[in-house]
């Protein structure tokens, strides 16, 4: 794997329940609304341990596999364009994401974009229509 080893840990507070956050992180209908770099439209059904997904960041493929999924955490293992682990933790009104991986991509920036997108998606759920 080319690139450099990177570590990132970010946490934000947001107006959402634990269940809303979990739904946004494990259901493809929700993931398509916010996931950066984009969630495949052909992926159906909620995530479960062992589930694999092929993601694309431009021309760079990222093979993603759900390693663990609990009531308040989700751990991905990535390979190909990004080689490492990403773990999401959440609770009432907060979410945290940690990543340790090798890549040529600036992973800290990508995680920040993911959190902004997730926050924006969850804010839309709370805003009056």
Image (tube, grey):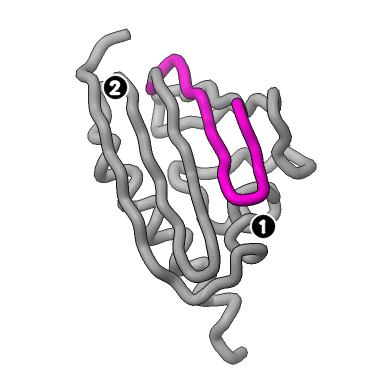
Residue 23: mark:
1
Residue 37 place in picture, x, y as percent? 44, 42
Q: Earlier in the sequence, mark 1 or mark 2?
A: 1
Question: Magenta residues, as a range?
Answer: 67-82
Is 53 placed above or below 90 here? above
Determine whether, in the image, residue 38 is placed left or right of residue 101: right
Mark 1 nearby-residue class (10 Å; few <14, some 14–19, many ≥20): some
> How many numbered marks appear?
2
Please report the residue visible at 26 percent of the width from the left and 41 percent of the height from the top.
Answer: 108
Say if the magenta span includes residue 76.
Answer: yes
> Which part of the image, by quadrant, shows the C terminus?
bottom right
The image quarter containing residue 103 is top left
Residue 127 place in picture, x, y as percent? 54, 85
For disc 2, the marked residue is 103
Camera-nearest label, 1 or 2? 1
Determine whether, in the image, residue 86 is placed left or right of residue 8: right
The image quarter containing residue 98 is top left
Residue 124 place in picture, x, y as percent? 54, 76
Question: Looking at the image, which residue sits at the far right?
Answer: 45
Mark 2 nearby-residue class (10 Å; few <14, some 14–19, many ≥20): some
Question: Looking at the image, which residue sits at the far bottom?
Answer: 128
Please report the residue visible at 55 percent of the width from the left and 26 percent of the height from the top.
Answer: 64
Please report the residue visible at 63 percent of the width from the left and 55 percent of the height from the top.
Answer: 22
Residue 33: mark:
none
Is 11 placed above or below 40 here? below
Query: Marks 1/2: CA distance?
Result: 28 Å
Nearest the eye: 103 or 99: 99
Determine whether, in the image, residue 122 is placed left or right of residue 49: left
The image quarter containing residue 11 is bottom left
């Amino acid at each position: 794997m080319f690139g450099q080893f990177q570590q990132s840990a970010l946490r934000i507070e947001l107006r959402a329940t634990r269940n809303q956050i979990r739904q946004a992180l494990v259901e493809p209908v929700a993931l398509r609304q916010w996931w950066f770099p984009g969630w495949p439209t052909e992926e159906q059904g909620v995530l479960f341990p062992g589930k694999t997904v092929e993601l694309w960041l431009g021309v760079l493929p990222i093979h993603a596999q759900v390693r663990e999924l609990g009531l308040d955490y989700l751990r991905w293992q990535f390979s190909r364009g990004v080689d490492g682990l990403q773990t999401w933790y959440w609770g009432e009104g907060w979410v945290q994401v940690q990543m340790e991986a090798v890549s040529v991509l600036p992973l800290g920036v990508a995680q920040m974009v993911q959190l902004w997108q997730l926050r924006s998606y969850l804010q839309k759920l709370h805003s009056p229509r």
